[in-house]
Image (spheres, grey):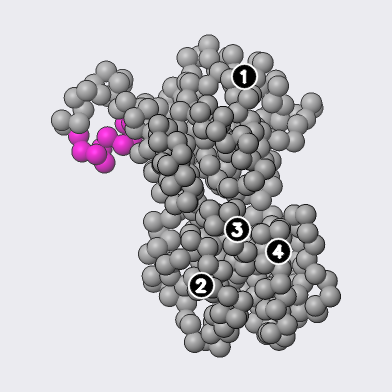
């Protein structure tokens, strides 16, 4: 069928939903490009924006990911045949956007930083999606103008979705949580033990992510002092606060690129989400939770809503309970529920998230 749009009013009479989906997607991807304006560099801590833009490209969309770090010597880099990294945003706006519009392309702008709301018209967008990721205080002043600017809002957690439905009932919104690349994190027997772990014979307790003000530093220190035979490994960036250097078995391993992270999780005994309870953490849907589980590791978390009811994620509602949950795992009294976790994870891949995005976009597609 060369032009699906010509028959969109009757296709549903003859084709099943499964047969319709690729036709819908092809119709949109043929005439649309997806643009992610400068927010986070492509190579920094592969997170939701990079994962979703990659999914759009793998499903046939032409994608332009604008790096926050700019360059005057390199204008673009090809990540894959459909995904282009933009290194000069002003050049992209002044030269490439007009050319795309001349080609009749529809520009779908995917935005995850509300402060950009004032600059989005420069991309000549046909449709704007605001990806509401986190409840940061610093972003609050820009939330309403960003939501008003967007055609649709996507949220990552129940709390954020409830906020949209309560405060902005006039705006189309959909909850699409984070996900995981299962192939990237699934344990592999041939992967060598990271060098930082080689000389340690006891259990390994790992936290992966930004070491920031929302991490319960006191809790992590108590954990290290309680399990002195364990290596408590902190992996990630120090975000405004430093990891303590005075406790011998609490070690900061630094930032590890996404490609290097899986072995560190695979060879851990238990992984942590030790967040303090505050607006930003209560509203978060932590990617690390998916990555820990995909690595075959049990998780101990403080009582954040998005961690409740997940197989092999153990909730500690106090410091004492958190440490007791970790002890049960270290003493092999809380086995990893591999089958349940596998079934749960299969519904939470980035590919599944892309499918949910396409479903949420159906009204826009008119197919």
Assign the magenta stretch its main secondary structure.
helix
Which residue is at a point 62% across and 67% down the rendered structure image?
A: 274
Q: Nearer the viewer, mark 1 or mark 4?
A: 1
Image coordinates for residue 44, horizontal then vertical, percent? 69, 47
Work out whether mark 1 precedes mark 3 in sequence or the reverse, and give the earlier one. 1
Identify the residue under disc 2. 315
- Compare marks 2 and 3 and give the one earlier in the sequence: 3
Dot 4, how many residues are within 10 Å of its Cα: few (below 14), some (14-19), or many (20+)?
A: many
Q: Determine whether, in the image, residue 268 is placed left or right of residue 247.
A: left
Which residue is depicted at the point 79% across and 26% down?
72
Residue pointed to by mark 1: 122
At numbered mark 4, what does the secondary structure look like: helix, strand or loop? Answer: strand
Label 2 environment density (alpha carbons within 10 Å; few <14, some 14–19, many ≥20): many
For residue 77, what is the image quadrant?
top right
Question: Which-is-in-front pick, marks 1 and 3?
Answer: 3
Range of residues picked out in magenta: 15-24
Give me the disc on residue 235.
4
Query: Badge 3 is on which residue?
Result: 278
Nearer mark to the viewer, of 3 and 4: 3
């Amino acid at each position: 069928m060369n032009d699906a749009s010509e028959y969109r009013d009757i296709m549903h009479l003859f084709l099943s939903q499964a047969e319709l989906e690729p036709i819908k997607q092809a119709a949109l991807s043929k005439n649309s490009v997806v643009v992610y304006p400068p927010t986070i560099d492509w190579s920094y801590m592969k997170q939701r924006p990079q994962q979703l833009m990659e999914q759009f490209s793998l499903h046939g969309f032409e994608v332009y990911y604008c790096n926050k770090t700019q360059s005057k010597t390199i204008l673009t880099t090809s990540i894959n045949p459909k995904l282009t990294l933009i290194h000069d945003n002003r050049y992209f706006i002044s030269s490439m956007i007009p050319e795309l519009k001349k080609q009749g392309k529809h520009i779908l702008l995917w935005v995850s930083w509300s402060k950009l709301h004032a600059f989005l018209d420069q991309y000549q967008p046909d449709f704007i999606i605001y990806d509401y990721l986190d409840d940061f205080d610093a972003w609050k002043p820009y939330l309403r103008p960003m939501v008003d600017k967007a055609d649709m809002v996507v949220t990552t957690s129940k709390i954020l979705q409830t906020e949209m439905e309560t405060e902005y009932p006039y705006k189309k919104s959909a909850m699409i949580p984070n996900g995981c690349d299962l192939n990237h994190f699934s344990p592999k027997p041939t992967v060598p033990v990271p060098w930082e772990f080689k000389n340690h014979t006891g259990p390994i307790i790992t936290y992966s992510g930004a070491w920031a003000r929302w991490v319960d530093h006191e809790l992590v220190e108590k954990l290290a002092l309680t399990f002195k035979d364990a290596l408590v490994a902190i992996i990630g960036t120090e975000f405004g606060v430093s990891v303590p250097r005075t406790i011998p078995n609490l070690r900061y391993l630094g930032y590890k690129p996404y490609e290097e992270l899986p072995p560190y999780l695979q060879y851990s005994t238990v992984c942590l989400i030790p967040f303090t309870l505050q607006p930003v953490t209560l509203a978060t849907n932590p990617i690390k939770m998916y990555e820990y589980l995909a690595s075959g590791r049990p998780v101990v978390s403080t009582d954040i809503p998005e961690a409740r009811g997940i197989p092999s994620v153990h909730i500690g509602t106090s410091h004492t309970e958190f440490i007791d949950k970790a002890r049960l795992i270290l003493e092999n009294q809380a086995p990893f529920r591999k089958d349940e976790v596998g079934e749960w994870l299969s519904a939470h891949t980035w590919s599944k998230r892309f499918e949910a995005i396409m479903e949420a976009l159906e009204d826009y597609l008119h197919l």
